[in-house]
Amino acid sequence: MTNSFIVRSRRRMRLRAVLLVLPSVLAGCAVGPDYATPLLLLPSQWGSAKQAQHKAPRLNNWWYGLHDATLNDLMEQAVAGNLDVATAKANIREARATMRQARGTLFPVIDGVSSSTWSEASSDGSTSGVSTFSRQFQKGFDLSWELDIFGANRRGLEAAVYGTEAANEELRATLLTLVGDVASYYVDVRGYQERIALAKRTAASQRSTAALTRAKFQAGTSSAVDLANAEGLAAGTEANIPELQASLAESIHRLSVLTGQPPSALLPRLEKTAPVPSTRMNVPVGIPADVLLNRPDVRLAERQLAQYTAKIGQAEAARYPSVSLTGDISTSATHFGDLFKSSTISWTFGPSVTVPIFHGGQLKAAVEIAEAERDTYFIAYRSSVLTALEDVENSLVGLSQERIRNRKLKESAKSYRQAATLSRALYQSGSTSFLDVLDAERSLYSAEDTLIESNVSIVKDYISLNKALGGGWDRPVDASRPEITDKNTGPHFAYRS
């Protein structure tokens, strides 16, 4: 064994050691700010909540508290078929692929290269001379590796990881909005059905009063004015029914589309009437800090802030030198079968350094742009927190005040019901004028219709409160399956359809 061979072996060993140690040494080096979750000053308790409501919120499947099996089934359908959910799942797949792409920048790039050439040369340089044919086959590998000394690629990967987490939160935020919308439109459907049934009952009662008035008119104990008023009141009540029917159909159409179906798909299923769902009295709301953990839109804004903080490091790293290792190894021969046998082998290997010297201020401007984008997302994060707090406070006030209003409306409807019954009996016996009957029946219908609307509002305020607290779909949703499965993606003749 010669000394030169020993020297070359030792050099190779040192080079391998450097290549193995260098990435780990450089891995801890990065430029730009390191992200930390901002600390925000939040109130210690809700201003509109009672003491009993400060328990931790119970957000899992909150719509089960409405005790409606049809609504539960619609939730399942909506999560499976909603197109906004499908879009959010596609965004997750894109973010995951972007993350894998960013991770690949941390590793060497190796390409295989093969070539074959045929050449002809004349011995005297003219076309009449003797020609010599030659051919050469070459095969080898090219390698390049950016060492990422100042962490540009690692910051890119960091941003991609945060982007994937943001995409997951976007899906959760979409699901939160979806279950809230499904519940709200379903409650609207049941509310319109009750209002239509009330209008039909009231119109039938008013038609009965009009018939009584007609009989009294024919007997000469009532005037034509009374008869006209009675028939006009009944017709006016009946005129409300088509408008309510149209609103009912629109709500069903919206529910159908939310579940990913044509607008009329749910008409047969929801044609049978059912009462407006009822809610429990107290809803635990926890403390304001809970929104930071429970609201997906707040978590989404925070992850976006983290993502754009990492992008500052990407932009900053472009202002520093970059170091790459490049190399290739190849073998060539005049016959293909001689490759790796009776062939020549050559190789090159070495580092290259690129130092930014003058870019006209572009690199510094890029950092400032990234910093401004980060500031924008920081403001958006703070705004999302304030919006979340506002949503909860508004929902608490709305729900508590609507319940107070609802109790008064029940008392009002009860009193008007008694007044209508008494006035109708007195009018039938001739003890009062028809104007009393007319006023009592008009007031009763208005009070009962408003009471139904209030019942709907209570449930919708309950829905809004659960949404504001961050209650959405908490079960796993598979985002890995694409909407379209491509076929025949390998090499083939392309054609236009």
Image (spheres, helix red, strand yellow):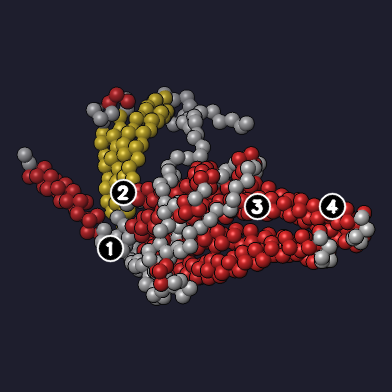
Disc 2 versus disc 1: distance between alpha carbons? 16 Å
Residue kind at label 1, given as amino acid type = Cys
Residue 194: image tag: 3
Residue kind at label 4, given as amino acid type = Ala
> Can residue 325 be seen at all in this image of the molecule?
yes
Disc 3 versus disc 1: distance between alpha carbons? 67 Å
Q: In the visual, does 38 lie left or right of 188? A: left
Q: In the visual, does 70 lie left or right of 54? A: right
Residue assigned mark 2: 107
Residue assigned mark 1: 29
Disc 4 versus disc 1: distance between alpha carbons? 92 Å
Residue kind at label 2, given as amino acid type = Phe
Q: Is tag 3's residue or tag 1's residue first in the polypeptide sequence?
A: 1
Task: State yes or no: discs 2 and 1 in contact (Cβ < 8 Å).
Answer: no
Residue kind at label 3, given as amino acid type = Glu
In the image shown, does 281 or 4 lie closer to the viewer? 281
Q: Is tag 2's residue or tag 3's residue first in the polypeptide sequence?
A: 2
Q: Secondary structure at mark 3?
A: helix
